[in-house]
Image (cartoon, rainbow, N blue to C red):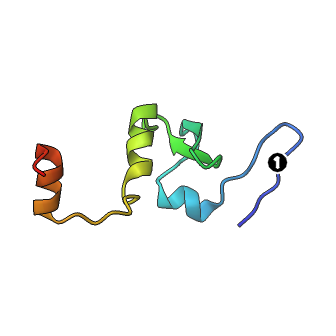
Amino acid sequence: MSTTITSKGQVTIPKHIRDSVAMTPGSKVEFEVNDRGRIELVKEGEAMTPRERRFQSAIGSASIKWDTDELMALLRGND
């Protein structure tokens, strides 16, 4: 769904989105730019710190599948 920015820089958040996250008139929001350059709108106080954002972006991104023995050998330095 798209919306248009007004000349004052305002946008309307669609009702079904506001309802799904319990935003009501007067709700405070924060804007963030994520690692992919996308703008995220979050309820005030729920924004992630830069460290949390880096951790969140790393979840599920590993391309190597270790089994326990291989990982322990790597960590312990057993060759």
Query: Residue drawn 11% across and 44% down?
Result: 76
Q: Which residue is mark 1?
A: 5
Q: Position of residue 50 (x, y in %)?
A: 46, 33
User: Could you say which quadrant of the image residue 63 lies in?
Assistant: bottom left
Q: Position of residue 61 (x, y in %)?
A: 41, 58
Looking at the rendering, in which quadrant would you find the N terminus? bottom right
Question: Which residue ends up furthest to the front in the rendered image?
Answer: 79
Q: Position of residue 23 (x, y in %)?
A: 52, 49
User: Could you say which quadrant of the image residue 55 lies in?
Assistant: top left
- Say above or below: 70 vs 23: below
Bin the neighbour count of mark 1 within 10 Å (Cα to Cα): few under 14, some 14-19, many 20 and up. few
Q: Position of residue 67 (x, y in %)?
A: 17, 66
Can residue 49 be seen here? Answer: no
Tell which of 42 and 66 is nearer to you.
66
Q: Is residue 45 left or right of 41 when viewed as pictured? A: left
Query: The residue under label 1 is which amino acid type?
Result: Ile
Tell which of 49 and 22 is nearer to you.
49
Q: Is residue 76 left or right of 34 when viewed as pictured? A: left
- Classify mark 1: helix, strand or loop: loop
Tell which of 54 and 33 is nearer to you.
54
Query: Residue drawn 40% across and 33% down?
Result: 51
Query: Residue drawn 40% across and 48% down?
Result: 56
